Image (spheres, rainbow, N blue to C red):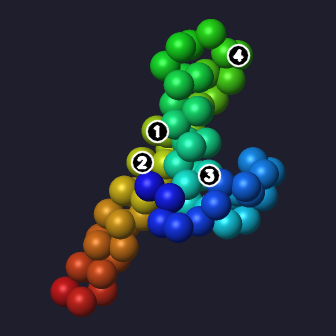
């Protein structure tokens, strides 16, 4: 879908115009690397993915715990 825009923007400048698309593309690339398992950074990628889930979850649970203790 072009939305009336030309495709004459070099790949280097596409991040400036579409940072969300570039970020999604990079996330897909990292996921592909992790799925292949051939890279030396695969354990680091998987650990970062686990931490990206665990840290916010722990923060929410701690806030709920402190809130219940404070308002009880």
Is the residue marked by circle 1 packed among few (<14), some (14-19), or many (20+) residues within 10 Å? few
- What residue is disc 1 on? 50
Tell me the CA gap for discs 2 and 1: 5 Å
Question: Quadrant of the image for the C terminus?
Answer: bottom left
Q: Which sits earlier in the primary sequence, circle 3 or circle 2? A: 3
Rendering quarter of residue 5: bottom right
Q: Which x, y percent locates residue 2?
A: 50, 59
Q: Residue at x 78, y 51 (%)?
A: 10
Q: Is residue 65 above or below residue 15?
A: below
- What residue is disc 2 on? 53
Q: Give whichever of 12, 61 is nearer the camera.
A: 12
Q: Which x, y percent locates residue 39?
A: 67, 15
Q: Give whichever of 33, 3 is nearer the camera.
A: 3
Q: Which x, y percent locates residue 49?
A: 50, 39
- What residue is disc 3 on? 22
- Pointer 2 with pointer 1, Cβ within 8 A: yes
Instruction: Please give the label number shown on residue 3.
Output: none
Rendering quarter of residue 45: top right
**Would residue 23 be visible to someone looking at this image?**
yes
Q: Residue at x 42, y 64 (%)?
A: 59
């Amino acid at each position: 879908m072009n939305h009336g825009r030309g495709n004459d923007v070099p790949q280097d400048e596409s991040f400036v115009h579409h940072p969300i698309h570039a970020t999604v593309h990079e996330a897909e690339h990292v996921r592909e690397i992790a799925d292949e398992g051939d890279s030396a950074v695969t354990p680091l990628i998987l650990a970062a993915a686990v931490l990206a889930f665990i840290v916010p979850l722990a923060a929410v649970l701690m806030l709920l715990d402190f809130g219940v203790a404070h308002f009880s």
